[in-house]
Image (tube, rainbow, N blue to C red):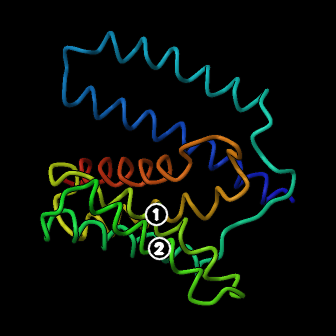
Amino acid sequence: MRRHKAIRYLMVISVLLVLVMFLTLVVKEHYDVMTTVIISAVIILPTLFFGYKYLDLHHEDYGYEKLSVVLWVPIGAVLCYLLNIVAGLGSILAVGIVGTIASFLPHLNQKSHYLKQLPASIYCGAFVGMSSVETTPNIWFVLAAGTLAGFFFMISKNLFLGVGGKLGTMAFGGVIAASFIYWLIV
């Protein structure tokens, strides 16, 4: 029970860290907007804190997505990236194709519970793969960002329920975390 609670707090802290990393990258890119970033941080962080504390965004039980389902997040990211960058279809068309194909997977076997879980994970990965070439410099970066997004997807199964944009937020978190690590290394 304590482990699950710690993982839940880890996920919420991860979302906060993603915001801090994003703001750090913004400051790195545009040094003259420091005042705007500080004001944004002062507004965003308390809003997230009070939203987490007072809104009922979570189930009471602790559940995690299965690894066999989460593995499809980086696959969706790579597929979308290949359609977006390599095939030159553009991000919107690429994510639409990947998402549409993923939506038909449950129809291959109507009784399969596993196939019913795949569209959300593939679509989460597709959001990673639709990033521009300036954000995602190569396929290995996309694979790393998709893996990080998959980790966020796995531990956030019962978090942020009823909040729109959860898949995009997990993808955004994966790309920002990978960008921050890439920035630290390079």
CA separation in Å, label 1 and label 2: 7 Å
Identify the residue under disc 2. 102
At a point 53% along the width and 44% down the height, the residue shown is 165
Q: Nearer the viewer, residue 81 or 95?
A: 95
The image shows residue 53, relative to residue 180, as above or below, that is above
At a point 35% along the width and 67% down the height, the residue shown is 77
Q: Nearer the viewer, mark 1 or mark 2?
A: 2
Can you give x and y, in whole percent of width and height, for residue 69 in the image? 58, 77
Identify the residue under disc 1. 123
Residue 33 in which image quadrant: top left
Q: Which mark is residue 34?
A: none
At a point 56% along the width and 48% down the height, the residue shown is 166
Helix, strand, or loop for circle 1?
A: helix
34 with respect to 147 (left or right) = left
At a point 32% along the width and 47% down the height, the residue shown is 180
The image shows residue 98, relative to residue 149, as above or below, that is below
Helix, strand, or loop for circle 2?
A: helix
Q: Quadrant of the N terminus?
A: bottom right
159 with respect to 138 (left or right) = right
